[in-house]
Amino acid sequence: MRVDHRLADELRELGARNISQCYSCGVCTAICPLSEEGREIPRRMVRYAVLGLRDRLERSLEPWLCYYCGECTKSCPRGADPGALMMAVRRYLITRYDFTGISRVLYRSPLAEALLAAALFLAVVLGVYFLHGPVNLERVDMESFLPAGVVDAADIAVAATLASLLLANAYRMYRLTRRGPRLPLTAYITELVKTVPPHFFTQLRMLKCRGSVRDWVMHALTAYGYGIVFVLVVLFLRAIHAGVYPAAHPLRLAGYVASALLLAGAGYAIYGRARRSSVARQYSHPTDWLFLILLLLTTLTGVALHVFKYLNMPLEAYVCYAVHLGLAAPLLILEVPFAKWSHIAYRPLAIYFARLNELRARRLQPSP
């Protein structure tokens, strides 16, 4: 067991500002709705952090089960803010799963994060400026302005890059947290089907953790809105780009629904963090703010683009399209594999990997 006293300092940089106040009374675990026998949340993570048990912290899946209801922080007699520690641990774990080192840069330097986002924005806007085709000012003609081949190539490149990064990071997460021998292939497939889709699509663990139906609904709606947009972009981008569907077509209606869900979810989250309306929103890391701002601006420019198309305002539509793509670039390329939005993948995977570890532990138990 290796002790690393630098671990606590690293976690303080990531948001665990009061970690040294903990004297291990156990109140946080007693009140946590997710605590059960053999799973002392969040006390075990606090002790790992304070004692510098880096290896044990990195092998843990428990931080992903927490949605920060704030009860542990409200009940802590020392003001150690164990909920903030759990958020800091999740940020730390993301940096460990990421083999590129980009997550570490984003979380440890808000300036570097802002500069990377700005660089991606400018790269896309300038790319549209230099690669665009004829500018038809008589009517909105997106197909001529930005040829479908360019759009398709960019779409495939981004999708392939994100998929590769997420799969690589998920595999590293699995390797770090795996405990015990291999299981039969059927066990991996069965547990994958039983755990990942239900938790991904329902987000029910958040309801169990926070107990707030409103928070759960808004979080789920945001995830659904993003999921709809992702499917539309990956599968139907060329048709949407060309504008071949009528206003009442199911694909357009899906876009309207997704926009409404994203606006509601991002607005609710920004309002709560600005007002600090709950314990869980008392402290926000710069990456949290950048994600929400990018999500809101990308959605708003997408809505504005549709309005300009409907009103047949060509120049405004072309400029808005370039800005919209520029905002979408850092939202996808930075946030999905490296920062805040990666939570949507890591949380259900953590439940899946924990279930596999439980099956391994049973196989190691001696037969009666």
Image (cartoon, rainbow, N blue to C red):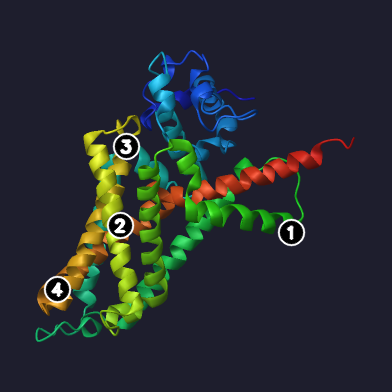
Where does label 2 land, which residue? Answer: 262
Q: Residues within 10 Å of mark 2 (few under 14, many from 20)?
A: many
Going from N to C along the chain, the mark reached first, 4 or 3, is: 3
Q: Residues under labels 4 and 1: Cα distance? A: 52 Å
Looking at the image, is mark 4 or mark 1 earlier in the sequence?
1
Quick check: 101 above or below 365?
Answer: below
Amino acid beneath label 3: His
Count neighbours of disc 4 (C-alpha within 10 A) and say few if under 14, some if 14 to 19, many if 20 or more.
some
Q: Is residue 115 visible?
A: no
Q: CA distance from mark 2 to mark 1?
A: 37 Å
| Up-down relation of residue 334 to residue 270 (above or below) | below
Q: Earlier in the sequence, mark 4 or mark 2?
A: 2
Disc 4 marks a residue whose amino acid type is Phe
Q: Mark 1 highlights which residue?
A: 186
- Of helix, strand and loop, which one carries label 3? loop
In terms of image quadrants, where is residue 231? Answer: bottom left
Q: Dots 4 and 3: beta carbons under 8 Å? A: no
| SS under mark 4 | helix
Q: Earlier in the sequence, mark 1 or mark 3?
A: 1
Mark 1 residue type: Thr
The residue where tag 3 is placed is 285
Q: Secondary structure at mark 2?
A: helix
Q: Quadrant of the C terminus?
A: top right
Which x, y percent locates residue 333?
Answer: 37, 58
Q: Are marks 4 and 1 in contact (CB under 8 Å)?
A: no
Q: Quadrant of the N terminus?
A: top right
